[in-house]
Image: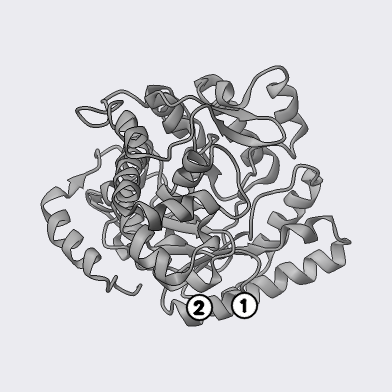
Amino acid sequence: MSRQPHHGHDARARDVRIERVTLLPADHPLTGATASSPLVRAYSGERSPTTPVWFMRQAGRSLPEYRALRTGIRMLEACLDPDLVTEITLQPVRRHGVDAAIFFSDIVVPLRLIGVDVDIVPGKGPVLAHPVRTAADVAALRALTPDGVPAGLFEPVTTAVGRLVGELGSTPLIGFAGAPFTLAAYLVEGGPSKDQLAARTLMHSEPEVWADLMSWLAELTGAFLLAQISAGASAAQLFDSWAGGLSLADYTALVAPHSSAALAPVRDLRVPGASTGVAANGGRVPTVHFGVGTGHLLGAMHDVGVDVVGVDYRTPLDAAAAVVPGVPLQGNVDPALLAAPWPVLKAHVHDVLARGAAAPAHVLNLGHGVPPDTDPEVLTRIVETVHAAADR
């Protein structure tokens, strides 16, 4: 259903990956419970009568029940508590009736678990105690994984995934991770940055250091994604929040190979006895790639080896479909319109659905995350509207 990666590094990776293909357990949700779900079918390129819908950041700050649960608990503390993760992930499924749950976590969780001194500062975001800017700094990171990523490192995560799978039944759970570039941007900058200037400087001034950092992050990210899928998640989404600041040339040469490597452990998996939606996807676990401000990178982001491309609100879906023909798309309601009068928002949702018809399949989502001040009833109303609208 989708274009094949054409870059040289992808071709070499495919030759290696043939030897690493691994079957998921026979009792994995993709073998039965979620295999025929609207989301998995759409991710596999099958168009259903109605479009599946979920929202990025749906499990979070816009829900009063979430804010009540998080009172006095720091973000990373919540992300590593299986009981809290389970409840927070389930909240929007109960309230909105969405077609998928997105695992409640944060992209810096694997960094924290491996021993990096990182915290999420309210109102600011991830902050590193020691920015990573030299070969010695990268060597110190590698010293955290002398024999590779330790087995059992993600036990709090896999415990929560296992509990969620039991609660969700036929509703798929989406696992996710931050892409190597976005994680590298935080590590090099020491925190959030609007232009990722230090990271972009490092990639050109110290290319060997950059490649070493990115390959280490790809290994860690791949292990994090694999842990979530192996524990029962039915799809994996790679977030490259800061990739939009890169040129196409820099992305293709210095970032894409590492994103491809991060996805490889999940891309290698096969679903035993795959039927319905998963079979249409070659028995693979569905993978999604999303970035912010990445309209100029959509083709390259697909070429890292994913099944679905997420599109932010800046690029109309029919325009995106022309760039990546034959590829299922996810997106792309403008979060700003969630606060607009309902007739305006409703017309926008229908426009997104109509433009999404240009792709072989479409999962409606936002073009970025749910703003904290969003009225939860608006999200519920969008879900009802999408489910009631026949795809064209």
Q: Nearer the viewer, residue 328 or 320?
A: 320
Please give the label number shown on residue 175.
none
Q: Position of residue 213 (x, y in %)?
A: 34, 43
Q: Position of residue 141 (x, y in %)?
A: 34, 31
Q: Callout 1, which amino acid?
A: Arg
Look at 29% across and 32% down and name the residue there.
Answer: 142
22 relative to 281 in the view: left or right: left
Furthest-bottom residue in this view: 322
Q: Callout 2, which amino acid?
A: Ala
Q: Nearer the viewer, residue 120 or 317?
A: 120
Q: Position of residue 249 (x, y in %)?
A: 40, 71
The kind of secondary structure element at disc 2 is helix
Earlier sequence position, callout 1 versus callout 2: 2
Quadrant in the picture for residue 9: bottom left
Query: Which image quarter is the N terminus in?
Result: bottom left
Q: CA distance from mark 1 to mark 2?
A: 9 Å
At label 2, counting other C-alpha atoms closer than 10 Å, the crowd grade (few under 14, some 14-19, many 20 or more) is many
Answer whether residue 81 is visible to the viewer in this image.
Answer: yes
Q: To which residue does mark 2 refer?
A: 321
271 relative to 186 in the view: left or right: left
Mark 1 touching mark 2, by CB under 8 A? yes
Furthest-right residue in this view: 341
Q: To which residue does mark 1 refer?
A: 355
